[in-house]
Amino acid sequence: MTEAPDTLKTTPLHGLHLELKARMVPFAGYDMPVQYPMGIMKEHQHTRARAGLFDVSHMGQVRLFGDDPAAALESLVPGDIRGLKPGRMRYTLFTNEAGGILDDLMVTNADGHLFLVVNAARKEHDIAHLTERLKGRAEVEPLPDAALMAIQGPEAAAVLARFIPEAATMAFMSYLPATFDGIPVIVTRSGYTGEDGYEISCASADADPIARRLLAEEEVEAIGLGARDSLRLEAGLCLYGHDIDETTTPVEAALEWALSKRRRQEGGFPGADTILKQLAEGAPRRRVGIRPDGRAPAREHTEITDAAGRRIGEVTSGGFGPTANAPVAMGYVETASAAADTPLQLMVRGKPLAARVAAMPFVPQRYYRG
Amino acid sequence: MTVKYTKDHEWVRIEGDVGTVGVTDFAQQQLGDVVFVELPEAGRELTLGGEAAVVESVKAASDVFAPVSGTVTESNGALVEEPSMVNSAAETDGWFFKLTLSSPSELDDLMDADAYKAYVEGLH
């Protein structure tokens, strides 16, 4: 069943999507473009070769104020937030008392406050969680009237520099308040494709003119959620609700890199006992990359067995990687089977398909390193 | 030569007692970029409406159903090698398989080209 369109919310770029003849689908309560006439394959390849513009205004944007919002937020996440220098950002996770993941998010030290970007499907949950748990320590200001778009790909920097010259030399995972044709925007050098690129936050009313200016540049095409998903899968990046959720811990999810050094020593985040114990001793299962041997993609929920046919896990994201030019997947397996090149079988339409554990990302990340 | 269509957007071209089956141009537009097909082997018995083949786009897998009952005589090896032919030539070189019809009267319940065209227009 699909939701009736009249129950869906729209982003400030909805009219532009329709004008561009996007195919619209319900996603996280929004009517969103899954692809444009170019198609997922070409949209994916265009982003890897040139520059793609994505509407991600459905995501949640939140500001945290207070005497020490970084110390307050650290009570909910395992990342080093106090150590973030002004203008720098990091990926972190809201964890629960069992060590599960409530959401993944980006946190920026916006010099005087924290700027958070959370998942669309989790934003109401996250705002309630922040408000309740940080009561008296930080003020939570959701930004429902802010739009967010991403420009991603090897030519993104050259394009954006025509409008915001100082964006060209921004460090990866940094933040810059700027103006775009006189319009105030917040730019971060970040994204969800494995490519160099930016996310641009602006007032809702300003999103359409900015998007049109960017799309008028020769290098840029509009890219839908379909290619966004295949790009992030090739980059080995998790999709909340699929690859990570309340039942997966950061160690099981192979996100140890998001457990900052100081926080490992100090603890003090929800589920720290479980997570730090797993960090020391290992977890029973682990998220791994998977390469099927043939050409058949293995989709989410495909059963994974060992070479003897015993069930050892499940695929959480899977499809065809247009840049890898092969099927790619990720999923959880028993830790004993998590080493690269371990042979696996994927039960696709009742038949075992040979596959092996593969290192991620499937396509090399090409972030800006100055 | 007669071509008939199903509500699931398969076509079957009839020559004597042999039917050639594929998906329609409308279906390939809905599927998007096709990256994989799984076709039935020669000798397999198919029944009307039963699962006959699988077509996968970047985003999702879809079943292709048998538009008529019969025995598969041949599948399109070129399509396995080049699945994007579903997009570029859905109703010609992108055929899926051929079968010998076991119940030719089943064809009477399928749509002709004009009826299918009207059916697709009704879906918009």
Image: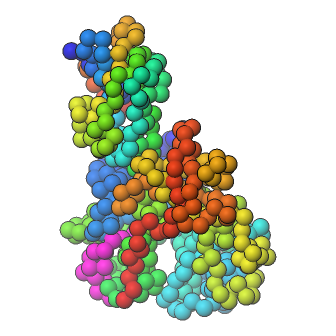
Q: In x, y percent, where is residue A182?
A: 31, 81
Q: Let me know if residue A283 appears in the view.
A: yes
Residue A298 inside the magenta-drawn segment: no
Closer to the camera, A195 or A156?
Answer: A195
- Going by the picture, which residue comes out furthest to the top? B105
Residue A152 inside the magenta-drawn segment: yes
Q: Image point 40% across, 11% down: which residue? A: B102
Tell me if B94 is positioned left or right of A296 in this view.
left
Q: Is residue B114 above or below residue A119?
A: above
Q: Quadrant of the N terminus of chain A?
A: top right
Q: In x, y percent, where is residue A263?
A: 69, 85
Q: Let me know if residue A12 appears in the view.
A: no
Q: Image point 56% across, 48% down: which residue? A: A346
Q: In x, y percent, where is residue A191?
A: 44, 72
Q: Quadrant of the C terminus of chain A?
A: bottom left
Snapshot quadrant of residue A174: bottom left
Q: Image point 48% across, 57% down: which residue? A: A291
Q: In x, y percent, where is residue A105?
A: 57, 72
Q: Is residue B107 above or below residue A262?
A: above
Q: Magenta residues, as a range?
A: A148-166
Tell me if A348 is positioned left or right of A211 in this view.
right
Q: Image point 33% across, 71% down: which residue? A: A153
Q: Is residue A190 above or below residue A294?
A: below
Tell me if A97 is positioned left or right of B54 in this view.
right
Closer to the camera, A284 or A202?
Answer: A284
Q: Is residue A262 above or below residue B7?
A: below
